[in-house]
Structure formats: C-alpha cells, structure tokens
Amino acid sequence: MMRGAAQALRHARYFSQIRGDRLILSNGSPMISNLRGAATCALYRPFIHKIINRYLIQTVRSLSISVASDSTGASADLGRSGPFVEYERRIASGELVDGDAFQVDTIMLLQRLYQQLVENEDSCQLDRYSTSHKAGRSRWLWSRFVPQSRYSPVKGLYLYGGVGTGKTMLMDLFYNQLPSNWRRWRRHFHDFMLDVHKRLQMHKGVADPLEIVAGEISDESILLCLDEFMVTDVADALILNRLFKHLFSKGIVLLATSNRSPDSLYEGGLQRDLFLPFIDSLKEKCVVHEIGSSTDYRRLTSAEQGFYFIGVSTVVFKQRFLNLIGKETPHPQVVEVAMGRELQVPLSANGCAYFPFVDLCDKPLGAADYLGLFAKFHTLALDGVPRFGIHNRSAAYRFVTLVDVMYENRARFLCNAEASPSALLEKIVTVAEARRISPRSSSRSQKGDDLELCVDNELGFAKDRTISRLIEMSSREYLEQHERNIASQMPPSASLDKEKQEAEENANVPSPGVMI
C-alpha cells in the first residue's frame, strides 16, 4: 500500500514538471523542448512531431503502468483512470485519429488536473453526498453573516487555441471521466451567462446579488467547466469580474476553453479597464495553456455530403425541408424561449423548424432565444443566408451565435446561402488583418478601400470557428451521429418506418442544387 502511494507520488511529480513546451525528465533532460527546437525546420516538422507524440504517449503509458502495478493500493485505480487513459483507448479503437503533440501536451495537463482533484476531493468538497443538503444550506446561511473565504488548493485550467484543435472534445473527454457524485457542471459559456442573468433577476433588489448567485453556483458545483469562453457584451464583462471574485473565494475550480488568450478577452471593448482585474484573477487561479496545433480536425471530415446549399431557389429549399419532416404537415408554431418571451416559428413539424434568415438573424434575438429554440427542435432550415459585411454586422453576430448554439446542441442545419462558408464571412476581418489588406500612408487616399469590409476583432476571431463548424455540420460523420441521436429517442417501430419512408422519398427526389 505504501509502495503504491509512493509510486503515485512520483507519478504526480512527473506530471507537475510539465511546463508549456517542456517535459523535464527525471534526469533533468528537457527532451521535448529539444525536439521542438528541431521541429522549427519546416522540412522535418511532421517527422519530429510524430516522434514527440510517440515519446509522450510511451512516457505516460509507462508511468500509468508503474502506478497500476501495485493492485493493492488505492492509487492503482488512479493510474488506470482519467482522461489520458480514455484518450489512448479512443485512439486504439479508431474513434480518434492519433493526436498531434499539442493535443498530447493538453491531455497530460488534463490528466494532472484530474489526479489533483482526486487527491484533494475532501478538501475541495467535491462529493455532493459527503454532507447533507440541510448542513450545506446552514453553512450557506451562516456565510451570509460571517463571510468566509475558501480558495481551492487545486489550480484550474484555461485552454485556448485555434479552431478545430479539439478543445471541446478534450474538455468533454475529461468531464465524462469524473465521478458522478462530484459537484460538477459543464456548460457552454452562452448558456452559463444566461443562467447567471436569470439568477440575478430572481435576486433583484438584494445588496449584492452576485454574491448570492456565486453562493448558489458553488453550492451546486465546485468544478465549473465552461466551453467557448468569450466576452462580447459590456454587461457580461462587468459581471464577470465581481462574479468570479466571489466564485474563486468559494473554492470554485475552473476549466475553460476559448479561442482567445486571457489577455485578448474583450479586446477593445467598452470600459475594458474594469474587466482587466478579472484577467489577472483568471491567470492567478488557472494554468493557462495554448493548444498550438495548426490542424483543424473538423475539416478532416467528409464534408461533401452536406445539407448546405448554395444559391438554390426557395421552392427547392422548402421541398428539401418537406422531405425531412416526412408525412407530417408543417404549421406555424409559437415556442416559449427565455424569461417568458415567445418566438414565432413560421413552419415546423417532426422536430424541424423552418425560418427565413431575416426572421432569425435580422431581429433583436440572442443566445437565450436560440437556446430555447433548440430545446424544442433538433433541426433548423435557414433560408437566404447572405454574405456578411459592414452593412449587416449585427446580423453576422447573431448568425455566429446561432451556429455556436446549434453546434453545442448537436443540431442538424439545413442551410440555403449565397456562398460557401468561407465566402460568406470573407469581408469580416480583425484589425490586424485589415492593416495587412489595406495599409495606410499619408500619401494614400481611401478610394481603393473595400467599403464592404467589416473590421471587428470579436467577429474576426469568431469567423474561423464559424466556418469550421459549418463545414463539420455538413459532414457525413456529423449527420450520421445526428441520425443516431434522433433514433435513440424514438420507439424501434417508429425508427424503422422513418428509414423506409426516407428511402422511398430519396429514390424519387431529383438533385436539388449545389451542395458542399
């Protein structure tokens, strides 16, 4: 037992020596750092990265085996569990392609976080059943009169990087390995902020409603996993600083993914100086790690079989929608979304909703409305998606949010657009990209400027994510997974009838137009 504990301690020490691009071995040799240095040569980079992958995986496997070898110790279970073990299993089974070195770096950090949480389960108060609900409420009430700080002994993790690098997949892989009795919560950032605003409404008129909201959240979940962390709204920016000050003081451990580094969050936003303390707090309470892979794994899917149509008529597009809903007759419907609001659905049937683009993205709607919509429907048909530029920037923001919510809910997207995903958003650029496209000098006039160019940092950074997700949502793999999800919710007889009906309809329907 003692020997197993000692092995587990050495295991944790190995992981604790991972720093960015460096893995310091027991003999002090910075092997990975040296290999990465060699990888700067473009000619050898793919070969070197394969060596790094193999070395990292073999190293962690040997460490896991050494811990698990003492089957009498509690640490044996620790060595055989966690995100790295599941990651390796999925690669071996072919569910995942062999990850690049950057993904392996990240999964090792997630494994270390997992182990630290297991080792500090009691001090972090992760087990929701360790104390009664009544005792928990008493402690919460007592803290209203005697404020108490209980910072977590475990640092969280903030993962950021380019689109399609596997951030969401790795977070979900980590989350699904956690014990079910832990106080944990996995949410998309849009959904999380919507919940915060709902709670604030409930505690309106209280001296510090954010402290109460933080108390409620920390009472429900100590480990908070937030996907796609991004700040575009001044109200959210002002809330986050004070909210997380309370959350961290109540022992919250944060695992977040984002396309932006902490220092780039809410860049150029109104009153950003009031947001900066949150960035400092985030960097203090979380290990910040960049997933530096240049591979967009979403683009490796079979995107040629999609429901993304370019320039087909509304008549043809509606016919494709009718094919999806089968024998049911579509009808207008009113659905309740958030905070008592209602959304008019022009046509709906069989879990599918049809909207003209202007009805869903040219009106003052937001994430809360879209979340409510996909709580009722699994498929959206959106007709008439235009190219985006300076003239319809607000609609572009809503479209980006809509795609994010659809992707998070694994919804199916039937789309009729003016152009391909890349062309739709090509006029959206960041400030840095605009300077490269149109450098200014004192002798140059503005006549050559592209008047449709929309220079917007937040949209510019979100653009690549949106394009990548649209491509994946049109892939055969994504659509097959969607069909499996729907079939799992149907009675067996209904599923067979649907397959027969679709086969008959597809045999008689001509090609509807250009698809990607």
Image (cartoon, helix red, strand yellow):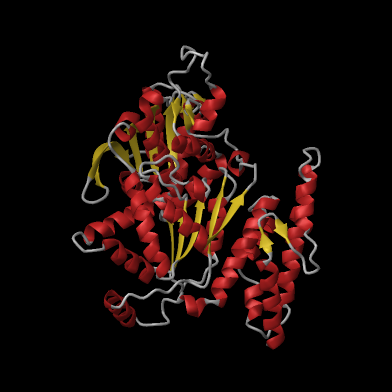
Residue drawn at x 62%, y 57% as measured from the top left = 106
Q: Position of residue 457 (x, y in %)?
A: 46, 36
The residue most toward the bottom is: 1
Q: Nearer the viewer, residue 367 or 29?
A: 29
To which quarter of the image does residue 242 belong? Answer: bottom left
| Residue 492 visible in the current orientation | no
The residue most toward the front is: 442
Q: How many marks?
A: 0
- In the rendered structure, the answer to whether residue 266 lies left or right of residue 54 reads left
To which quarter of the image does residue 28 belong? Answer: bottom right
Residue drawn at x 70%, y 52% as measured from the top left = 101
Q: Position of residue 479 (x, y in %)?
A: 51, 42
Q: Quadrant of the N terminus?
A: bottom right
Q: Quadrant of the C terminus?
A: top right
Q: Position of residue 467 (x, y in %)?
A: 51, 35
In the image, residue 511 sits, relative to residue 76, either above or below, namely: above
Q: Nearer the viewer, residue 343 or 21?
A: 21
| Residue 482 visible in the current orientation | yes
To which quarter of the image does residue 436 belong? Answer: top right
Residue drawn at x 46%, y 50% as measured from the top left = 229
- In the rendered structure, the answer to whether residue 93 lies left or right of residue 427 reads right
The residue most toward the left is: 205
Q: Nearer the viewer, residue 16 or 416?
A: 16
In the image, residue 360 sits, relative to residue 436, either above or below, namely: below
Residue drawn at x 22%, y 60% as measured from the top left = 202
